[in-house]
Image (cartoon, rainbow, N blue to C red):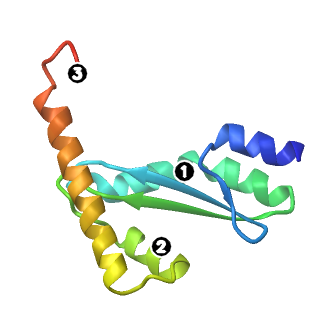
Amino acid sequence: SKGSNHFRSVCPYVSIYVCMYVCMELIVPFDELMTAAAHRKSTKYRDLVYNIRDAGYRVSLVTVEVGSRGLISDSLFTFINDWSSNKGHESSSLFDSVRRKVICSSYAIWSRRNSDSWF
């Protein structure tokens, strides 16, 4: 529908889940700034969430914070427990994978901070 396309253009990661929109924002701040980053992202998408609700849809905004040194915030644990059927060993593997990817990506960015090229 036209409304659905509008929301996808504003927030491309919106997914329909049983007549509900879920906006998920991954944030990778310094570990000490995770709470402030979550608040900043929640504020950024507040109007979008209100607009989706006003259009008659249910919506949930999830901010997931993973610190640049691999610290995973409670929000990811909560999201997995609320939305996933994989709540045991599989979710532990997911957390390890996310942690590794964030640390490697942060290191790659840091090590190329003075480079003119990323390749």
Residue lying at 29% horizontally and 77% vertically, measured from the top left = 92
Upstream in sequence: badge 2 or badge 1: 1
Give the foreground label among 2 and 3: 3
| Amino acid type at mark 1 | Thr
Q: In the picture shown, does residue 118 fall above or below 50? A: above
Q: Position of residue 88 (x, y in %)?
A: 36, 87
| Amino acid type at mark 2 | Phe
Q: Toward which corner of the image does residue 38 lie, by quadrant?
A: bottom left
Upstream in sequence: badge 2 or badge 3: 2
Upstream in sequence: badge 1 or badge 3: 1
| Amino acid type at mark 3 | Phe
Q: In the picture shown, does residue 88 fall above or below 27? A: below
Separation of residues labelled 1 and 3 (CA atoms): 35 Å
Give the residue pinned by disc 1: 43
Q: Position of residue 42 (x, y in %)?
A: 52, 54
Give the residue pinned by disc 2: 79
Mark 2 Cα shell of 10 Å, populated few (<14), some (14-19), many (≥20): some
Give the residue pinned by disc 3: 119
- Secondary structure of the residue carrying numbered label 2: helix
